[in-house]
Amino acid sequence: MAGTSFSRIPGADGAHPTFCRLCEAQCGLIADVEGGRIVKVRPDRDHPVSEGHLCVKGPGMAAITHDPDRVTTPLRRVGGAGMFEPVGWDEALDDIADRLKAIIARHGGAAIGLYQGNPAFLSALHIAYSSTFLRSLGGSKLFSVLHNDGPGKTAAMGLVYDNPADKTFPDLERCDFLLILGGNPLVSHMSFVAEPRVLHRLDRIHAKGGVVVVDPRRTETARKYEHVPIRPSGDAWLLGAMLHHIFEQGLEDRAWLDRHGVEWQGLRDAVEAMTPERAESECDVPADRIRALAVRMAKARTAAAYGRLGTNRGRYPSLTNVFTEALNIVTGRFGEAGGWVIGKKPFARQGAPRPAFPPHGAARSRIGDLPMMLGYTPGGLVGKEITTPGQGQMRALFVTAGNPVNSYPNGAETAAALEQLDLLVALDFYVTETTRHAHYILPTPTFYERPDFTETWVANAPRPWVQFTQAVIEPVGEARAEFDIYNAVLSRLGKAALFAEDGPLGASPSLIDVIDTSLRKGTYGDDFGARPDGLSVARLIEEFPSGVRPTPSVDPAHSWTRVLTPDGKPRLCHPVVRTEIDRLLQSSGEDKRGILRLFGRRRLSSMNSWMHNVEKLVRSDRPTLQMHPRDAADRLIGDGQHVELRSASGAIRVTVELTDAVTRGAVSYPHGWGNAGGWRFAASLEGENINQLASSEPEDWEQVSAAVHLDGIEVTVTPIEAVADAVGG
């Protein structure tokens, strides 16, 4: 690899090694540059993990990089929403700093918030330095997509391990049986798992013992392997009944549990009422099949149960994810090869003290009295934090690449609230449904225009690797890195630069210097010569431009060092878990006949709404409401018919697609549609934003994790003609 001829100067003609930053897979790419433009993106066949794998998203981002609709110069608001004029960087930054000074003087730093969004969220250290920027201003209102993407998982990690910052994942390399709940890896790769060649790994697992996909829809992954249809939001019942059967039959790994001192009896008692027969009536999975799944999970040589997006957006996301952790633990899979593991972070310093996180619920939101996880205010509260008077009312907001108007329920409410801010600064490369309300839009680079390191997700790699990439091309137009923008604001406020210190980094270190120091002092680093075989940024550039695997596989035993409970053992029945089990049991027995529940889905080419402006990706992709033919017949609905999809919170009009791929009692519509920003092609596409059907009221969310319920929403589907007749009547 070191001998491969690569261009090392951003924008120089030739082939540039880099990697994708649009999902956890982080596939290796080769970007061919001519005349300062990316003319082709191809797979990096020398990449040590993706090994030539490539999906459509990496090339799609190259199209966005050179999109004529892209914002490439600072914009200043001059009128109503969406009305901007170009402005110089110094003029924009000076005014932003002056406005911040006035806001802080009048309201204090607590009036300032920051929203972290994708794709900047996946760049190295972005989470750390944007959070530091907010704290430097005296602010603490930090928002992200956490509460509609992974709230249940984060809550479960805190409840079970006292460690909400890490994520457990399956050791795919040595796994014989894999249970997938609410995930579709053939489309989404494997969220929370950094494995580019997931299809090959799943094929091997299925050949050894089986890959079982639990989902209300026969997804692309379910079609290829084994499908267990389930009612939307029924996963907690399925998992609880599996645990019940394991305990009833003595299938728990008693020797393993005793060896590790794990107290499991409380969980056994708590799920005693969750029999497979009772679960069948709640989740529509036959009791015998529930028992069979439990036996397969318990008796496989190696196994793991993995849940993803669908387990985080329904009615019981925290309990579902706790049960997933528990299923892996009571069958003896946690911290074992081929089982359920926690990986090593590349920037984790040797000998650093164990982190300590506040107990679950110790910090709570100003509005709704909801638990705050990892310091994040529930993202669905962005609008209400602006409009609700009182101490800490938000008067200024920085939005980095996010789109909360579209990402959370009641976008109209959020949009109206944004108009009330004294200052809204958006760091983005598009005029979106959110940024159109900004006072300033500051252009930022795509991942092809920035140097970067695989920091964010490599800890979740069954086959760990690291890679540093230089920028492929210089930033287009006047785009600037977020790190530099934040430092420019801090400088104007007379505050210290990000990561400033008295040591070798100095008073104003560059982001690359911080990355290099963090790498060298971290898990795989050279410790500035103390570990001669270790890595540095310079060594990665010179010797491993396509990346390197510093260790053959994830270390299962390391998982135990990330259990941060006082006794170092997983906590299987936290009091919050008992309360959630009681809530689940109390909800059982409801008459579900005739009820339809909505859940989302995604397609590979359109999984990110801001990629809808790439015509090549979505020109043949039209969103439809998938519905079972028998459910449609009951409502006199035909294939291709236009219908009103209504919930207690709103209504949209969509087109029906009849298919038996969805279970009876369920309807599915893809998320991310309904574009109304400044992107010309995307705005011309049909489609609606299904988040408008979810409730924006905090009391309607899950109280354990502040999860906004975006799946499992009870809806009605009515032909447009019938709606018109009813209105006319």
Image (tube, rainbow, N blue to C red):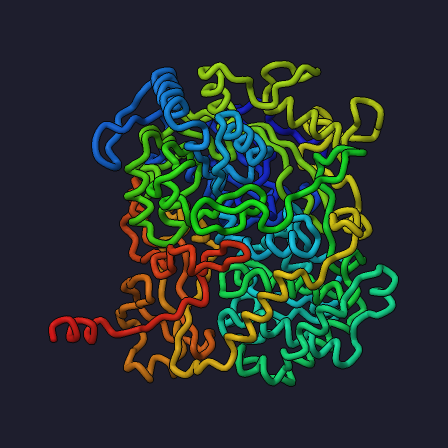
Q: Residue at x 65, y 52 (%)?
A: 158
Q: Is residue 32 toward the left or the right of residue 536 in the image?
A: left
Q: Residue at x 20, y 76 (%)?
A: 722
Q: Quadrant of residue 185?
A: bottom right
The residue lying furthest to the left in this view is 728
- Can residue 205 be seen here? no
Image quarter where the C terminus lies is: bottom left
Above or below, 299 against 141 in this view is below
Please state the horizontal and vertical placement of residue 504, each as a whole percent of the image.
70, 15
Please state the horizontal and vertical placement of residue 246, each as a whole percent of the image.
74, 76
Q: Residue at x 43, y 53 (%)?
A: 606
- Can residue 47 be seen here? yes
The residue lying furthest to the front in this view is 390
Q: Nearer the viewer, residue 509 or 68?
A: 509
Q: Is residue 563 toward the left or the right of residue 497 in the image?
A: right
Mark count:
0
Q: Residue at x 80, y 30 (%)?
A: 534
Please state the horizontal and vertical placement of residue 170, each as a whole percent of the image.
70, 58
Q: Is residue 552 toward the left or the right of residue 46 in the image?
A: right
Q: Quadrant of residue 335?
A: bottom right
Please state the horizontal and vertical placement of residue 433, each as a whole percent of the image.
32, 43
